[in-house]
Amino acid sequence: MAISFDGLSSSDFEGLCADLLHAMGFVNVDWRKGTGLATSPADKGRDIVCDHPRVEPDGSQHFERWFVDCKHFKRGVPPKELQNLLAWAEAERPDVALFIVSNFLSNPAKEYLDAYRKNNRPSFKIRYWEKPQLARMLRRKLTLQRKYDLTDIPIRSVGEILAAEDECETKVWYGRKMPAEFYRERGTPEHIIRGMLKAKRAAEKRFGKKNLARGGDFEWGMLSGKLSALRWVLGYDWDMLDT
């Protein structure tokens, strides 16, 4: 599905960029909007300031400081729109100056950046993310897509959620049950054992015996996690796995 940012306001696009950076693992994400206006006149060329954690091969960690300028244009961004961020980056020396662009940088803007790198040899890296990169980064982030009205993928119905919860509950219940002899040795009444066996046969008929195999620890953990998440959506507390 193609993603378009054209329906967003400039302020909404900045908010999306801030949320995306946070979702990607950036920390200390500071959206410098600071006013109720569509754009902030006081951001000084940096819509967002944030830190990117980096882990070295020896396990030590440091943080890169990023200055981010969000450009919400329906056409190519011209070179003059890049100058404020570069000027502030020259003055304050972040590690990276990043332009996030809702569509594309114009060809003259890309040529301007190439010439700037060559002639000024800045101490900071210059990067830009255009629409294709943003769409790829957002592909699996449906929560952000819905928050900013970028997708028409429907939220699953209550009926679908209930059906999935019932299936997971049955599979967890089945996986917990021991052979009948285990219960007979512990004095479980025979009518309870017969009821359990009947319920197991019904589950096998419904899902297929091979699909009810407990599997290894990973598969069992995934199944339990699914049941917990589905029940949370339905109003239960987290980790409610009773069957």
Image (cartoon, rainbow, N blue to C red):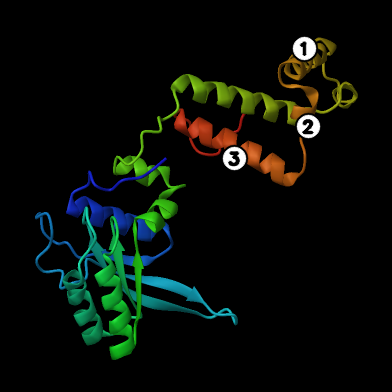
The circle on residue 225 is 3
**Element carrying mark 1:** helix
Vertical relation: 176 (above or below) 113: above
Camera-side mark, 1 or 2: 2
Image quarter of the N terminus = top left
What label sits on residue 213 in the rendered view? 2
Amino acid found under the numbered disc labelled 3? Gly
In the image, is 242 to the left or to the right of 25?
right
Bin the neighbour count of mark 3 within 10 Å (Cα to Cα): few under 14, some 14-19, many 20 and up.
some
Q: Nearer the viewer, mark 1 or mark 3?
A: 3
Q: Mark 1: which amino acid?
A: Gly
Query: Which residue carries the number 1 mark?
Result: 195
- C-alpha separation, residue under disc 2 versus residue under disc 3: 17 Å
Which numbered disc, 2 or 3, marks the residue that appears first in the sequence?
Answer: 2
Which percent across, then down, holds residue 154? 40, 30
In the image, residue 84 sits, relative to residue 161, either above or below, namely: below
The local secondary structure at tag 2 comes to loop
Whether residue 243 is visible to the viewer of this picture, yes or no, is no
